[in-house]
Amino acid sequence: LREGTGIYMLRTRSIHTKFMVLLMGTICMTLAVAWLVISTMSMQWLRGSARAVAEHVVAFRSWVAGPGAVWVNGLQPNAPDFLEQKLCNDDTRFYSKNPALATRELSDMIAKTAVHATFRVVSDNYRNPQNAPDAYEASALHRIKSSMINPPSDRVDFVEKIEGSTYRYSIPIRVSDSCLACHGSAK
């Protein structure tokens, strides 16, 4: 009778152990799938938000580049830079800002908001040392430029990377005629 009881208990424990392993496996798989879904949705949200910001920045630069510069009446204390100033008949001063300067100031302003986004326009052929690309930006420039020899369907539209808690996103900016007034040749 004792042997039968021992075998019964072993079988019971075996079924109990199998159930617990199956339950723990199911819980782990469910958590893994949930993490994957949340991670994928977060990346899609980050990418969509970054693309929207990038498209707005490009549109803003085009708007400023259209007339060559924007003229502002008075300077913000945190944005004292300007290219040229003009005095009107009533002693009002206007200051000009080109696309690069206006974009840098816009980025500084947005960085101080709840969005905490910043953006930079960089090139491997920069004029201002402040616009020199960092390691990520240089790598993104290289990937984007290298893909330009490919057919349009195979070109890199964007480059992204997560660095710690920072999401980085880069897109190419197409050179237009209004850009060439300051930046010279498109090549």
Image (cartoon, grey):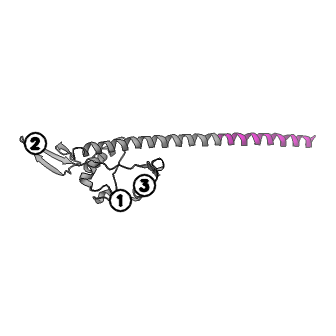
Which of the 4 image quadrants contains residue 134? bottom left
Q: Looking at the image, is mark 3 or mark 2 nearer the viewer?
A: 3
Q: Mark 3: give few (<14), some (14-19) or many (20+) Cα within 10 Å.
A: many
At horizontal 31% and vertical 56% (from top left) the residue drawn is 131
Q: Which of the labelled discs sits on residue 3, or is there none?
A: none
Judged left or right of residue 91, residue 50 is right
Distance of label 3 from label 2 (alpha carbons): 44 Å
Quarter that holds the N terminus = top right
Q: Secondary structure at mark 2?
A: loop
Residue that mark 1 sits on: 124
In the displayed orientation, state which residue is furthest to the front: 151
In the displayed orientation, state which residue is furthest to the left: 89
Residue that mark 2 sits on: 92
- Does residue 15 belong to the magenta stretch? yes
Q: Earlier in the sequence, mark 3 or mark 2?
A: 2
Magenta segment boundaries in residue numbering: 1-27
Q: Which of the labelled discs sits on residue 140, or is there none?
A: 3
Distance of label 3 from label 1 (alpha carbons): 11 Å
The majority secondary structure of the magenta stretch comes to helix
Q: Choose between 60 and 153: the one closer to the eye.
A: 153
Q: Position of residue 9 (x, y in %)?
A: 84, 41
- Does residue 79 belong to the magenta stretch? no
In the displayed orientation, state which residue is furthest to the right: 1
Q: Earlier in the sequence, mark 1 or mark 2?
A: 2
Q: Position of residue 64 (x, y in %)?
A: 25, 44
Distance of label 1 from label 2 (alpha carbons): 39 Å
Which of the 4 image quadrants contains residue 36? top right
Judged left or right of residue 148, residue 127 is left
At horizontal 41% and vertical 41% (from top left) the residue drawn is 49
